[in-house]
Amino acid sequence: MPQFFTTLLHRLRVRDGDIQSLCRQLISQRGEVTQTALAQRIIELYRTMDSHQRLDFFNMLVGEFGSDQLAIQQTFEQHWHNPTPSSATALFKVIEPPRQELFRRMNTGHRGTETLVAMRGDLLRVLSDQPQLDVIDADLKHLFRSWFNRGFLRLERIGWHTSALILEKLIEREAVHEINGWPDLRRRLAPDRRCFAFFHAALPDEPIIFIEVALTRGLAQKLAPLLEISSPIQCTDDADTAIFYSINNCLHGLRGIPFGNFLIKQVVDELGAELPKIKRFSTLSPMPYFAQALRDHRRFARERLGRLLDDFSADLKSESGCSEPVEALFQLLHDDPTKHIEALSGPLRRLALVYLTFRIEDKLFDPVAAFHFSNGARLESINPFANLKPYGLKESFGMMVNYGYRSHQVEENHEQFVRSGEIRLSGHLRSERELAAQLWEGDAPRRTKKHAQSR
Amino acid sequence: MPQFFTTLLHRLRVRDGDIQSLCRQLISQRGEVTQTALAQRIIELYRTMDSHQRLDFFNMLVGEFGSDQLAIQQTFEQHWHNPTPSSATALFKVIEPPRQELFRRMNTGHRGTETLVAMRGDLLRVLSDQPQLDVIDADLKHLFRSWFNRGFLRLERIGWHTSALILEKLIEREAVHEINGWPDLRRRLAPDRRCFAFFHAALPDEPIIFIEVALTRGLAQKLAPLLEISSPIQCTDDADTAIFYSINNCLHGLRGIPFGNFLIKQVVDELGAELPKIKRFSTLSPMPYFAQALRDHRRFARERLGRLLDDFSADLKSESGCSEPVEALFQLLHDDPTKHIEALSGPLRRLALVYLTFRIEDKLFDPVAAFHFSNGARLESINPFANLKPYGLKESFGMMVNYGYRSHQVEENHEQFVRSGEIRLSGHLRSERELAAQLWEGDAPRRTKKHAQSR
Amino acid sequence: MPQFFTTLLHRLRVRDGDIQSLCRQLISQRGEVTQTALAQRIIELYRTMDSHQRLDFFNMLVGEFGSDQLAIQQTFEQHWHNPTPSSATALFKVIEPPRQELFRRMNTGHRGTETLVAMRGDLLRVLSDQPQLDVIDADLKHLFRSWFNRGFLRLERIGWHTSALILEKLIEREAVHEINGWPDLRRRLAPDRRCFAFFHAALPDEPIIFIEVALTRGLAQKLAPLLEISSPIQCTDDADTAIFYSINNCLHGLRGIPFGNFLIKQVVDELGAELPKIKRFSTLSPMPYFAQALRDHRRFARERLGRLLDDFSADLKSESGCSEPVEALFQLLHDDPTKHIEALSGPLRRLALVYLTFRIEDKLFDPVAAFHFSNGARLESINPFANLKPYGLKESFGMMVNYGYRSHQVEENHEQFVRSGEIRLSGHLRSERELAAQLWEGDAPRRTKKHAQSR
Amino acid sequence: MPQFFTTLLHRLRVRDGDIQSLCRQLISQRGEVTQTALAQRIIELYRTMDSHQRLDFFNMLVGEFGSDQLAIQQTFEQHWHNPTPSSATALFKVIEPPRQELFRRMNTGHRGTETLVAMRGDLLRVLSDQPQLDVIDADLKHLFRSWFNRGFLRLERIGWHTSALILEKLIEREAVHEINGWPDLRRRLAPDRRCFAFFHAALPDEPIIFIEVALTRGLAQKLAPLLEISSPIQCTDDADTAIFYSINNCLHGLRGIPFGNFLIKQVVDELGAELPKIKRFSTLSPMPYFAQALRDHRRFARERLGRLLDDFSADLKSESGCSEPVEALFQLLHDDPTKHIEALSGPLRRLALVYLTFRIEDKLFDPVAAFHFSNGARLESINPFANLKPYGLKESFGMMVNYGYRSHQVEENHEQFVRSGEIRLSGHLRSERELAAQLWEGDAPRRTKKHAQSR
């Protein structure tokens, strides 16, 4: 610990009353070294606080470090009477809440960025019950969008050569398909796999977001071979496809700061340069809310999806002995999923197709689909019985989806999706969707045409 | 060049009209990859523009990417009728000029940060003639204060082991005491010297600011031994003092973003840890405007400094044959500076003391002194005949100053200076200042007491 | 794969008969690139060979790549008739077996060093049955002593920040106290621990030897707290002692090349620099052959140790119901080790003291003791019931030993031990040894005095 | 300085008599830490010795640290009566001079490798006058061939991003075409150039050998455009040829340890991978002894080259007014080299061709040619008036040579050259050589055919 700071921190410890007075000093202090010592002390205090104290702290930030309403009014009036660019700048300055400057100053302390990101994580956990704290979230989000700007992130390949300190965080933060300890991680970093992460200079040991990729021959439509620890390592010379099978944000406090979109495309470019034989880039994605959507089918799609489900499920009910079709389906799959592959694959695929591609109140129901379509991906394949692990059956009756990324179409797909909601489908799904659409919409086949084209 | 970007850049080149339409697209575009391709294209265009085109570009940014006055009014009215924290946030959002978001998006392109910093450099060069561009400067400065926050800078020691790419920039950017080629630089990085710089992750080969330090036995009060290439390398075991003899900001586009304050103190801490025998930390600083101040003495201090100067210069005039005292002084020093050391040292030191420590219209005249006093430094010594190079004679009759940094006093000195303008002097200067003050202020000796104390 | 080598390797594959002819080509080839291609091919072939083929290969090296006896005779005769320094050099050249040059050339291929080290590992495994291969071992050992010279090794601290690739090797190669997976390793790299390894530039991912250190308050005399994964992490500020609790050679093929001696002392110096509060450096070492020595007591010490053991074990026999004292001891400890601590500690300590410090046929029986005494360590403490794990009870009835390293004594201790066999003991062990010696030697107490002194 | 060593070094300083007794202690010492402390002390003493003391030291090494002749005789006799592989090993051990072990132990000290390499440099400087020291050179060379084995060297690209510490050594050690300070070096590291060096882990800041490469369009046959600091930087996209225009060994103490052969080929492979458009790899080499060979033409080639020279030079003599043809040539070139390009180019080329390709007493006269032919290069082009700098005119009348490296021919060329002395020529040189050969050999045109073929 350097001597300037040691001396200053010592004094601060002697005299500091509470975090509130430290924050007041920090915002009014003009000497930068003292600022940093104050920032340091606030960070240390914050880190020792329990959740009640943190809530008090947040409320204090709302009460005391918001912008000065009187100054806003005065400045606005001046601006209004004589609006000039520089009066607009003055207005901007009084409207920016002092919290933002407080946070910028806190950032100068040791572990500042790390603590501010963790602080937003704490905030997000209580936000639904404490809507008055929204303004703090707006401030932190504004700062983080600037600080974690794409221009400040660095893509790095993660492998078995990577520091255990970082690898351990992948194990902790993999939330899509849990990593069961180091041998599992080791398989996911074997020569037929790739893993990439974004890093920020202020958080050198902290992957911000990471993506796991399998190099395969042909489009992988089942999860098990990708996750099986003992699966043989493939020769990458034979691989023609890169399967993105898991993408995870690591820092809760950066929720809503968009990285994933970028990561996928930069990884496509990296892989294309390293392995020119790889011609196809696709995800193998979950449908995390499919089962729930079917259960809530009335909310989801009122009578229409229900009708599809009913048609499909008459047989299920009799076979399983349940009268409710979703429960009947679970019952059958619970007993022995593989027995019903032939009978259920087609109907399930059609149901999923409707679920993934039709909008309810102008919104796609499935957030994963919405993410990939908005990135410019194409719906490549819907795969029943792709994830037979308990969580796979529970979430989506074991179904998974491939979203394909094709360099020459991504931008156009993205623009069409954003502009008109149009979704790109692979050829075979397009035909199937026509059929599904007739069942679904009955009277609106034309809209289907406009919205789904195969390329 | 990755394939996504290649494809996109190719299209952009085909269809782009001008930088204005590209900026419009960039600000309205929601797809991040397209944003980056647009950013890239704008950066490339900007880099090829001449100064007229850049001025047009700046004016376009003022005209088109300022905040929306109508929206401001509406949002303000809503806020005014029902002021809530979240209406304040909404107001903040409409008041932030779209330029800031445009710059943040430009930053995602390759060499984005570098180009934005260079852009502000271009802007500052024309600002005095183009006051309407102040608002762009306010936006860039706001962003840079956030991006180049102390928490994102990394202190690095510079030495002969450092990359030539970086060392070359020291040679280019040393503006206090010019580095005459590589042998000169090599001497300044010898074992009895230290050099430190701040770096930012987005500009890895670019020192932001650097400081040159000589390790000496005793307080160095002359410049020549420090700059002499052939001076023998001292054994650091004997050194008890670190002399900060040059500090340089490297990037014109970061003017006004404060780093130097921090750099000095962090370097004091680094040196203290590496070399515990070093007990004294001091600058050897120029007085760049001293001669000019004496010339402008009426503006500087009306009759008072004039009186001092006149008293001191009666003899000068007769000896040099010039009637104007400042010119007389130049004449004498020009002919043979060393001849007059005995006669001139005392009077020059007293004049400088007045110049450095008295305020005119509540401001110190000397910006270097103001910088160090505001950092908490103490005025340690005033050294006549310390820099006999032509620029030294011209700027300050060869005088230089030591400002001392003492860990246990820095914070207190800083606070006193900020609060009451009080300046800390070393013991022997304090006595000298009493005398000078009597000449200077005549009727206000009490104020002197309050303002100058030796410790 | 570079094109020169690709082309050459292709040809070699086409024409190569067997490894023997490749070795002949390699030793006669003058072009270095071809040499490297041949080396590469031999390495590849060797790596695919099974143990029978490798034995054939070794025998071929003995038969064909030894030195030329006729040339030796001729050169020797010339040297004998007219012995000059340069005829001695000529003699050296013909006597050096061509195998050494063959190995040096093999080393130029990719993974050359790694393969040669592995080759010696293979050789050592069969050497006891194939004494004719001793000459190859002499050649490899000669090369490795030169290549793995202390001047070419680099000490590195190992921590949780280290690459998983390297950490995995610690798990594999820890042979003293097995590392049970990654959580165990993580505890051993926690802030109150240190781990260091030697590395060689040609084997960048391969620790050559590593040492594990615990920082403790007081001398650690029990193993369990050091190995317990859930033991609380100590504050290093309180630590005054560094305990070296495990040291492991990683590469079987480097057996007999001495590194450990050096590693301990360099680590003492590193820790002394990092943590000046650490004042005591000591091992906590096993006695791997103690139980075996007692069982073989007639061989070990004929009637004398037997007498000590008999005296000590009369009670044991009656209590345990076994008539053989060593088995009686096992029986008691097997049932409940902690029950007998009071009764057994003293007698066991005395037996161990005799075992560790007396020579049989001028050799210490215990190799760990011999290693540390020859390094200049002092016997600090003998700790009964220190390792109650099954392997600890089996090897040494749970006993462990502290060997202390004291900077100012190490060289002198080492010299005395080498010169006269004298062993340094701590004060309390010295008294105990006097007693034990009387039992042991009866008629030779004087010799004891000479050999054991406390300091 | 670590404490073990400090303590030991202190004692050594107190008691050490002279370097001879330190060497005796080092060779007899078994403790490795003491060995290292002794090694350290010997290194320090050696570094302070002047050239007389070093000569004494070398003579002492010959007198005292050679092998034991009596032991050799005894071991040889045992071996002779019963020759076994292990008696051969025993013989090897007594014949290896103790100097080698002494050097290996010296290598454990700080800066050991560096000092031993420097020591051989010192030795080589006196060797011609002190032939009794040859045996030390044999020992050091034997060690260095093992230590600086290709498997322990690492190729690194050198550029403007490289440490100034290393770049400075390029400036110092470039001996082919002097580097005139940093701006010259900077041009040689510009984007249209490449520079590579071999490094050894024990000498991290010391390039062992380096090569300078220009990327050009077409075969560069003149030196000036490559060395001109202000020559415009070429776009590497257009380049189809890599010209190796300078290769330098940096460490005099490693003379005779072969690296250059390897470096060229590895650089060909590196460039081929980085820049697939580069199709031709060629040197632009000096003929450093051409003028001297012509002057010594009787020794060089008796009447034959003389005859060629006389035919060619009849005109020269009359024009220059000198009667001796070589002096006449110098005279003409000295006055204005470019005036005679047309007249002299053909004859000079033919003379050079004979000089470069014919053997005198089964040896090529030109060492640069011998090096490249033995590496498998082809004689591509002979370029009169290629280096008009004074040293170029003086050494070789301004002539330079291109030796071409072609992946698919290198091995075969090398083998043919080594086996039968056959040299590969480019097509146009082959025809020219036929003509030259007739003049040269007169009666032996058949031998010419066998030796020179174009491919």
Image (cartoon, coloured by chain):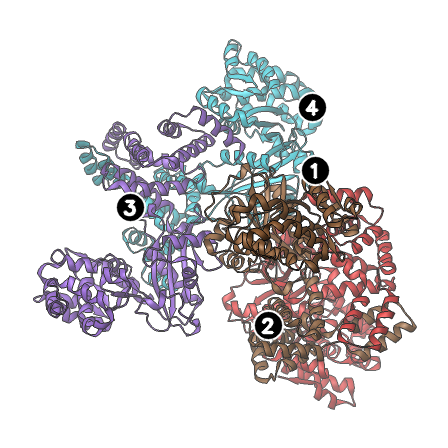
Chain colours: A cyan, B purple, C red, D brown
Residue at the disc numbered 2: C281
| Numbered circle sitting on residue B127 | none
Q: Are marks 2 and 1 in contact (CB under 8 Å)?
A: no
Q: Quadrant of the C terminus of chain C?
A: bottom right
Q: Nearer the viewer, mark 4 or mark 1?
A: 1
Q: Position of residue C22 (x, y in %)?
A: 81, 50
Position of C388 with respect to A149 (left or right) is right
Quarter of the image with the N terminus of chain C is top right
Residue identifier under label 1: A234
The foreground one among A88 and A323 is A88
At a point 89% along the width and 68% down the height, the residue shown is D84
Q: Chain of mark 2?
A: C
Q: Which residue is mark 4?
A: A341
Circle 4 chain: A
Packing grade of label 2 (10 A; few <14, some 14-19, many >=20) is many
Using the image, tell me which numbered label, if any, was put on residue A64: 3
Marks 4 and 3 share the same chain? yes
> Image height check: is B229 above or below C165?
below
Q: CA distance from mark 1 to mark 3?
A: 60 Å
Q: CA distance from mark 3 to mark 2?
A: 55 Å
Nearest-to-viewer mark from 3 and 2: 2
Helix, strand or loop for disc 3: helix
Q: Quadrant of residue C415?
A: bottom right
Q: Is residue D336 above or below residue D88?
A: above
Say which of A21 and D236 sits in front.
Answer: D236
Residue type for callout 3: Glu
Tell me the kind of residue under disc 4.
Ile
Q: Find the distance from the CA under tag 4 to the CA under tag 3.
A: 62 Å
